[in-house]
Image: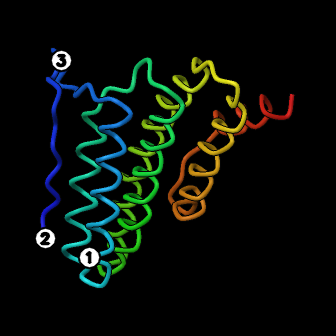
Amino acid sequence: MHLHLRHTRGVDAKGRMHITADEMAEIYKSFHAALNETYWETASNHKICTDVMETLKTTHISKKSGRFLLLFTSALSEAYSHANYNVQGLLYDDRDIVRANYWSDILLFYKAVMTKADRVNTQSKCCHLLALLLHFASLYSLYKDVAEEVSFYTKRLDILQG
């Protein structure tokens, strides 16, 4: 099975897609439905995850709403958590290399997302930040054996406590 994602907006000079929160919701909805259809088919499930990973890598996240960031991180969290389980069939050394690469991607995503989240002005900013951090913590729990330093994560927790 292949995930068909519809892109209604153009691509900028840096190759990034500019999409709205509603379009991000549609991507998430399609992705979630495809995951459910392929749950027990590891190869198909992994293909869907990598399709979404590539879509997220090319999605421009500047000046987005809290809703967009939550949908983006929801798709991110599900794609990388399923991918983590899908690579269990690889040889141990190969699996660690793939998972370390996934973790590097996750860190890049979250550094960008958290920077944008600081600029979102909503009444529920604290709740949005907490939800984003919970998605990150969930991924960290899966990748902690290959994870690097996560100092920006603890910095965000200090902000929420202050």
Question: Which quarter of the picture shows residue 126?
Answer: top right
Q: Which residue is the site of mark 2?
A: 1
Mark 2, Cα crowd under 10 Å, few <14 / some 14-19 / many 20+, is some
Q: Which residue is the site of mark 1?
A: 37
* Total marks placed: 3
* Discs 2, 1 touching: Cβ within 8 Å: yes
The spot of residue 112 in percent (x, y) is 46, 28
Which residue is at 35% across, 65% downward? 83
Vertical arrangement, residue 42 with respect to residue 33, above or below: below
Q: CA distance from mark 2 to mark 1?
A: 9 Å
- Amino acid found under the numbered disc labelled 3: Asp
Disc on the earlier residue, 2 or 1: 2
Vertical arrangement, residue 114 with respect to residue 80, above or below: above
Question: Which quarter of the picture shows residue 159?
Answer: top right
Q: Which quadrant is the N terminus positioned in?
A: bottom left
- In the image, is 36 to the left or to the right of 141? left
- In the image, is 52 to the left or to the right of 119? left
- Amino acid found under the numbered disc labelled 2: Met
